[in-house]
Image (cartoon, grey):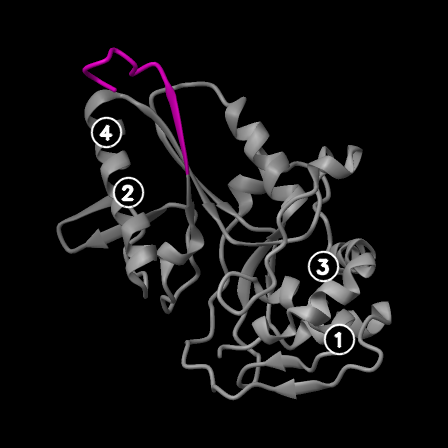
Amino acid sequence: MKQSNLLSTHFIETTTTGVHGAPNFTIPEGFLTVETQDGRDIIPYAGMATSWYHMSKANDINNLFLASRMWGLTVTDVRTSIVFGTQTEETRMDPLLDTRFNFDFYFGVVANRFCAQALAGFPITVYGKGEQKKPMITLDDAIRSLVRTVELPADGGFHVYNQATMLISPKILPIQLKKRGAGKGSKWTSGHCPTRGKKTKPIRCGWFKEMLLPGRPSSLQDEINRIIRDLKPYRHTLRTYSDRFMNA
């Protein structure tokens, strides 16, 4: 970008909250203030990822931070949390705009998969105790906030936003499904693998909510209601592919 004279560009990357790992402190929104015996400084926080994929995103962040600091490139790092849902404001306008919906073991996020399992009459599989909380955001809120990100001014800085609106544990989701009445005929059963992850600390999202998602974000219950409504016509399809719910 420097060689092409494009440093006035606002470079936006969607990384992931997975770069944070599971530290023993509240997860900051991009930076940590570090104080030692002989000084104090503010440094970017990332790099405690627990997978090669997430660590590759941490490496992206390091390179972009360097580009911003060395060349004055405006960089916005949107650290996307777990996204769940079926529709956005725009896709609701026409069925031809319907989005992809992943509910399988590998790519289907837990909220989507539980909704699909409930409608298919398949046992809702909560792994271990289901107590590990993870940051999440609805598909609609994720898209709305990304649109606002594009509208931010190019100021030569490096900005980080934790794109999350809720911290949810898997064991809460079946309770919300029962409130919706979607779990009738489905049993809540424990999966075969105990969780090995640490309990998640709170994650700061103040700048994200203030700058990119002002107003009231979608609630967990409202989004589950929408998912169930949108998926009901596809019950047969969900039952047909119910073998995808579990790790074969």
Question: Which residue, given by chain and number where applicable, does mark 1 sit on?
Answer: 175
Mark 3 sits on what residue? 220
Is residue 87 shown above or below 68? Answer: below
Q: Left of 122 or right of it: where is 143?
A: left
Q: Counting other residues with Cα less than 10 Å from the Cα at mark 3, is it few (<14), some (14-19), or many (20 or more)? A: some
Q: Earlier in the sequence, mark 1 or mark 2?
A: 2
Residue 198 drawn in magenta = no
Sequence-first disc among 1 and 3 = 1
Q: Which residues are magenta?
A: 1-13
What residue occupies the far front of the structure in this picture? 240
Separation of marks 1 and 3 at Cα, in angstroms: 11 Å
Quadrant, the N terminus: top left
Look at the image and tell me whether residue 33 can be seen. Answer: no
Residue at 77% of width from left, 39% of height from top? Answer: 95
Residue designated by label 4: 67
Disc 2 marks which residue?
60
Q: Are marks 1 and 4 in contact (CB under 8 Å)?
A: no
Q: Nearer the viewer, residue 197 or 30?
A: 197
First in residue order: circle 1 vs circle 4: 4
The spot of residue 39 in percent (x, y) is 17, 47
Could you give the CA–CA distance between mark 4 and mark 3, rounded to whole angstroms?
38 Å
Query: Mark 2 or mark 3, which is nearer the start of the sequence?
Result: 2
Residue 140 lies in what quarter of the image?
Answer: top right
Q: Which amino acid, by three-letter code, is at mark 4?
A: Ala
**Which residue is depicted at the point 72% across and 59% down?**
220
